[in-house]
Every structure is written in C-alpha cells, then in structure tokens.
Image (cartoon, rainbow, N blue to C red):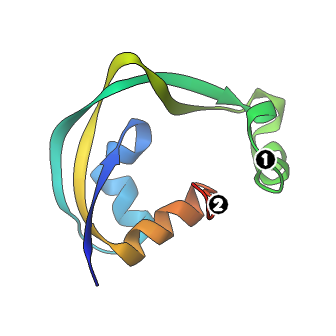
Amino acid sequence: MAKVIFFGYGANKDYYRLREILGKDLKGGESAMLEGFSLATQSLKNIPEPPRRILNKVWGDSFHAYTIKRGSGIVAGKAWVLEEEDLEKIKQWEFVGKDG
C-alpha cells in the first residue's frame, strides 16, 4: 500500500494519541508548517449529522474543536508517514466523509 504524508495539528500532532487511534508505532513526527491556512475552531453547528448527534451526546452544547481554514497564516504541526489504510482510520475517527 502507498505511503502518505499526514499533517497533524492540534491533538493529531501528538504521537501517543495517533498511536492509540492506529494501534501501532508511527514514523515521522517531524515538525512541519502548513502555509496559506489559519487555525480556527468549530462548534456543533459546523458539524454535519450524524457526527453532530454523537458529539453532542458526549460533549453537550459546549463542544468546540480545532480546524483549519484557508487564510494568510501558518499552522504548526507534525508530518507523519502513514499507510493509506492508516489515513482511512484517522478519517473515520475524525468523522471525515468520503469527500473530505
């Protein structure tokens, strides 16, 4: 399977968190910066269904999470070397749909 470079920011730059999600040790973890993006937050109203129901059940209306959006900034994170199947696991964990 092909290797991919995954840019992890926020909680996804943490080795131990990704190791728990993927169930294996990771390669990479080099400091990286993503230019042309800005760090932002999203609330429940920005989350599609059905993830919104799940997150609301766990966090209530106070849910907020980091996201990135196109902008003029730089977002700091880490670059991880993953298998394509690892990226799919992260997408499921993050509730990223087929178009994301």
Left or right: 80, with 72 as reference point: left
Residue visible at 32% across and 44% down in the picture: 13
Alpha-carbon span between mark 2 and mark 1: 10 Å
In the image, residue 2 sits, relative to residue 31, either above or below, namely below
Q: Residue furthest top?
A: 72
Tag 1 or tag 2, which sits nearer the N-term?
1
Residue visible at 48% across and 62% down in the picture: 90
Find residue 81 and report its image quarter. Answer: bottom left
- Callout 2 touching callout 1 (CB < 8 Å): yes
Q: Residues within 10 Å of mark 1 (few under 14, many from 20)?
A: few
In the image, residue 10 sits, relative to residue 62, either above or below, namely below
In the image, residue 12 sits, relative to residue 9, either above or below, namely below
In the image, residue 4 sits, relative to residue 40, either above or below, namely below
Q: Which residue is mark 2?
A: 97
Image quarter where the C terminus lies is bottom right
Find residue 31 and report its image quarter. Answer: top left
Q: Which residue is mark 1?
A: 48
Image quarter where the N terminus lies is bottom left
